[in-house]
Image (cartoon, rainbow, N blue to C red):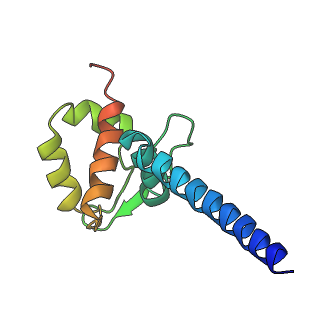
Amino acid sequence: MKREAIHRIKEISWLAGIAIIACGLSTAVYARAPVAAVGRILAIQSCSACHQVTDAQMPPGAVLNPDSLEQIRAPAFAQISAKYGKNTKSLRAFILAPRHPMREQKFLPHDLDAIVAYIRSLDRRH
């Protein structure tokens, strides 16, 4: 009876160890995901209500600019990429302190890095 219990405990411990390793591997794979791919996901979640984030996305509708009373469209990410090119510093600064009517964005630094990497990946000039 004691031997069976010991054998069962070892078996459960072994299975628990495998489960822990599997969880660690999945986390490691996510952590190594290309930064631009993570930025694409974040941009779709955070920016696609106003911006066309991907070529496959339908462009969002125009919104009223209360200052000029004109209907305006937020630029597509491909346009933003063409405008800023490799100037990562200016792109980051604009996202953190945008001009009206774009609202202030409060991204965690690593999330902003990922979104900027995604936008830069769209620049067809490099």
| Residue 4 percent location from the top left of the image | 84, 73
Q: Quadrant of residue 87?
A: top left
Compared across the picture, whether 21 is left or right of 33 comes to right
Residue 68 higher or lower than 35, as above or below = below
Compared across the picture, whether 106 is left or right of 22 comes to left
| Residue 74 percent location from the top left of the image | 37, 50
Q: Quadrant of residue 88?
A: top left
Q: Which quadrant of the rendered structure holds the C terminus?
A: top left
Q: Residue furthest top?
A: 125
Residue at 39% over, 49% down? 73
Compared across the picture, whether 18 is left or right of 118 comes to right
Viewer-proximal residue among 60 and 41: 41
| Numbered disc total | 0
Compared across the picture, whether 80 is left or right of 98 comes to right
Q: Residue furthest bottom?
A: 1
Residue 116 higher or lower than 16, as above or below = above
Q: Which quadrant of the rendered structure holds the N terminus?
A: bottom right
Residue 12 makes an appearance in the image: yes
| Residue 118 percent location from the top left of the image | 36, 40
Residue at 51% over, 44% down? 59
Viewer-proximal residue among 119 and 67: 119
Viewer-proximal residue among 117 and 29: 29
Residue at 41% over, 43% down? 32
Residue at 80% over, 74% down? 3
Residue 99 makes an appearance in the image: no
Residue 79 higher or lower than 7, as above or below = above
